[in-house]
Every structure is written in structure tokens, then in C-alpha cells.
Amino acid sequence: MELSITGTNAITYPVMHVWDWRVAIYLFLGGLSGGLMTMSAINYLRPGRKGPMQSVCCWQIPVMAPILLSIGLFFLWLDLERKLHGYLFYMTFKPLSPMSWGAWIVLVIYPLMILYALAALPDEVKARIKNGFVKNVADAVAPHLSKLAKLNVVFGVLLSIYTGILLSTFVARPLWNSAILPLLFLASGMSTGAAVMIIIAKNKEVKLFFTKLDIWLIFFELLVLALMFYGHYTADAAHRAAIMPFFNSSHDTFPYFLSIITIGILLPLAIVLKFLEVTGKHTEEVSGFGLFLMNTSAIFVLIGGAIIRFALVYAGQLSGYGYNMM
Amino acid sequence: MPRYAMVIDQSRCIGCMACVVACKRENDVPPENYRTRVLEIVQGTYPTLTTEMRSELCNHCDNAPCVSICPTGASHHEEDGTVQIDRKKCVGCKACITSCPYNVRYINEEHGYADKCSFCQHRLREGKKPACVATCVGGSRIFGDLDDPESEVSKILRRVGHRVLKKEVGTGPNIYYINQYPKRA
Ligand code: SF4
Ligand code: SF4
């Protein structure tokens, strides 16, 4: 009979006070708004785009990006145990703390997002703005749309990748402690950004462009996910133990098992749907069925992206070195 | 400046939990939280079982991830090598809790700040030992200054084989474990 009882005096055994769904939502929305910045800017900048810049489509997307980021940050704020002390993030800059970078990065990102959103407003929308100041700023930045779009490509990537860098620096949590995690979050952020472009865009040509692009992004995302698991599997015992919840269907770890199965079904299915759509026959207008295919696959991508954040946030905190390894 | 460390002689621990109680009383630790704990780890194949008594607390790591992750500077190193929390600066973001490989931090639910073992900093200032050390009936917890070659901890660590927990994480812990009953120095 093999016996191994750890910490029988369970009363003093620590239960870690965890980061919960609020942090997962922040990471998801942060990645998504980074994806929206980059994807909408790519839409303006890509060669082959037809028509003058402001009139292309989807001016709503650059407007959505700062709103989604704010909602994400609101959830992060909800997770703070001392909400009124939030200003302390801005009383110091700690170069070694990715938590501190995150607080300061948003101060750079917000102006970029907002100016870009204003510059991208088409004339008919601008005409409806009542506030004179906002209107003037929008007029002043409009000629710089292309420059702002380029900056948004770069900072969208940085924002998306940041959410993964934050987690990857935790040496105590082997599941996160991998340089490939930021890439996974980047791929997922960009891919969810493309998904929202597909849903919002009215113009068929734009929808098709992002449907094609998203096929590559999802491939990349799945590749990085597989590499992450493989990397952990071949690393030390703590890293290997850290991925085990995803491959164990027992009661305790079932949600993780389910999450990997769901991702494994949803994302490839999204690729197939997109493939059907881009290889199908195309008329001038999107057919009802085509629209259904595109939107369904885009929703799969969004759900997949959210599941990745939730599963990793929770499973990461189960992982560790020594006796508290799963 | 001293450089504080603790040596725990596991062979002298009788599992009475007096240290756990002393710590809670001394530091007003909320009922649901602990700054130190004693694990009773039973392993082996019946009938050859072994029990390990292992006291755990903040390791006051030299290379403390809780200090580097803290966005506000609330978690910091003091000159005496200990890791302390400036409660006024803490936003309760919990990054330090997640970053600690030893799971020794908690949130004080009433006030919202992160908290953990301070080596009883207030007692050290009065020249006393931490409450858990002062109360330990088996003499299992030994506290002192690593910079003083004549301190009991320095002498023990020079002469006796010792280990630290989760060395592979690379945090440079300052709680040392020995197993030397009945003779230790
Ligand atoms: S044991 Fe944990 S809380 Fe204590 S110094 Fe090390 S990392 Fe920080
Ligand atoms: S909870 Fe407090 S001490 Fe811990 S990292 Fe956040 S601000 Fe620093």
C-alpha cells in the first residue's frame, strides 16, 4: 500500500487567493482591442483597398477598440482588493514589473486609439458630432489617418502581446512561464480582432479579406498552442505537470479537459467554414448563407479566444513547483 | 546591517503548532489566514512510513519575484535582507500572491492589502526574536544573522548539511532546513 499524505493539518494549508474571471475577461478584451487596432488599421493600409480612406467601411471598429479596452480595465479594477488605491499604479514606475508597464502602456495606447478613431470618421458621421472641440480635433487629425493607422498596427500588436508577457514572467507558475505564451495571446488577439472585423464590416470585399487572413491567423494560433503544450511536455516535471489538467478528464480537472476539446473543435471548424466561404462562388452581394458561414466561424473564433484566456488564467494558478504540483 | 535568516531543525519539531498560534496572536492574523504553517507529510509503503514535519513561512527570498512584480513598490526589500510590505502603497492587485512559489501570501480581507510573515519586524526592532522562534518548545526554529559569523544560524549552516525549499525556482530563499536530532552544532 503506497501512502502519500501531504499537509494533513489541512486547516493551515493555504488556499491561494486567486485571480479569477475578472482577470481573464481583462486579458481577453485587452487582446481583442489590440487585435481591433491592428486589423482595422491593416484594412486602411492594405494594398488593393478600393476608394478613399475614410469611406472604406467599419469606422465603428476604431471606436470600439478603446471602449472594449476600458471595459477590460474596468474588470481589472473590479479585481483590485483596494479599488480606491488604484491611483498608486501611477505614483511610481517599476521597470522590472510587467504589472507596472501595463498601467503605463495604456496611457500611450489610449491617445493613439482615440486620435485614430477620430481621424477615421467619415464625413457623414462627423457631421453628426455636436461637440465643437471633438469635431475640430477630428478635422485636424483626419489628414494623418495613414500615419495613425501605421502606429495603431504596431501598438495593437504590443497591446495584444503584453497580456501574454504579463503572465509569462511568473516563474512560480510553470504553465505561464514560457516565452511562447505571449505569441499565443498575440495570435489569439489578432484572430479575434479579425473575427470582429468580419462581423461588423458591411462591405463584402472587406469581409472576404479578413476571412482569408483569419484562416492564417487561426492556423498560427493552433500551431503555437500545440508548440506550447509540446514545449511544456518536454520541459521539467513542473512544466509537464502544469499541462496535465488539460489531458485528464477526472472530476477536478474536467473543465480544463473540456476547454481543450472545445478549442480543438471550434477553431479547426472555423477554418473549414472560412475555407468553404472563400473558395465558394461569389456574387456582388454576400448571400444569406455566406453571411451565416462567416459570422458563425467568427463567433467560434471569439469563443475560442475567450476559452483560451479563462483556461490559462485558472490552470496557471494550479501549477507550481514542489508539493503543490498537480 | 544584519542579514536575517531562519534555520528549521525538522527533527526537533513535535507538531504542536505553538508557532502557528503565537504568530496569529502576535500579528493579528485573521482567522482564515496563516503566515506560517506546519505540514505533516506522511509517505512510504506500509509499514515503513515516514513522517516529515515541515514548518513553512515566507522565505524572505534574495531574488524575490513578489518584489519584482509589485507595480507600486509596496513589496520591497529592507536593508536587513527581509522582504516587507508597505501597506499604504498596496493596491491589492494580488500579483505578488500569484508570483510567490511558496504560497505564503494572502489578502487581508478586512483591509484589502497583501500580507505575509514579516519575521516579526516590530519585535526585531526591540531586539527580540520572531514570536514563532521565541515560542517553539522543541527548539526547532532558530533565528539569526547570517552576516555575523558567530551567530547560531551561521555556525549551523557552516557545519551541517542543509536544504532550502524549491531551490530550482531560483528565488534564493532564506529559510534553511536541517535534520540533526539530537545534536546540531
Ligand atoms: S517566499 Fe514568497 S512572499 Fe516570501 S519573499 Fe519569497 S517570493 Fe516573496
Ligand atoms: S497586492 Fe500589493 S504588495 Fe502585492 S503586488 Fe499588488 S500592490 Fe504589491
Image: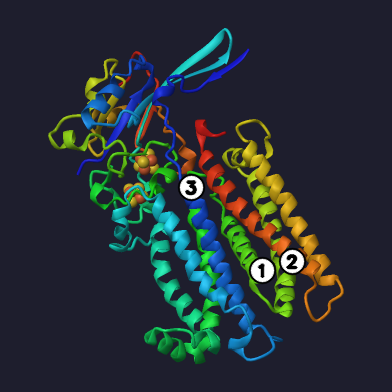
A240 or A61: nearer the viewer? A61
Chain letter of the residue carrying label 1: A
Q: Quadrant of the N terminus of chain A?
A: top right
| Left or right position of A176 against A265 | left
Give amino acid for label 3: Val
Q: Pointer 3: what residue?
A: A171
Confirm or reject: label 2 Cβ below 8 Å from ligand 2.
no
Whether tag 2 and tag 3 are in contact, CB under 8 A, the answer is: no
Whether tag 1 and tag 2 are in contact, CB under 8 A, the answer is: yes
Residue B27 occupies quadrant: top left
Give me the C-alpha separation between circle 1 and circle 3.
39 Å
**Which SS class for mark 3?**
loop
Kindly indicate whether the residues beneath marks 1 and 2 are on one polypeptide chain: yes
Disc nearer the start of the sequence (1/2): 1
| Left or right position of B53 against B28 | right
| Left or right position of B51 against A104 | right
Chain letter of the residue carrying label 2: A
Disc nearer the start of the sequence (1/3): 3
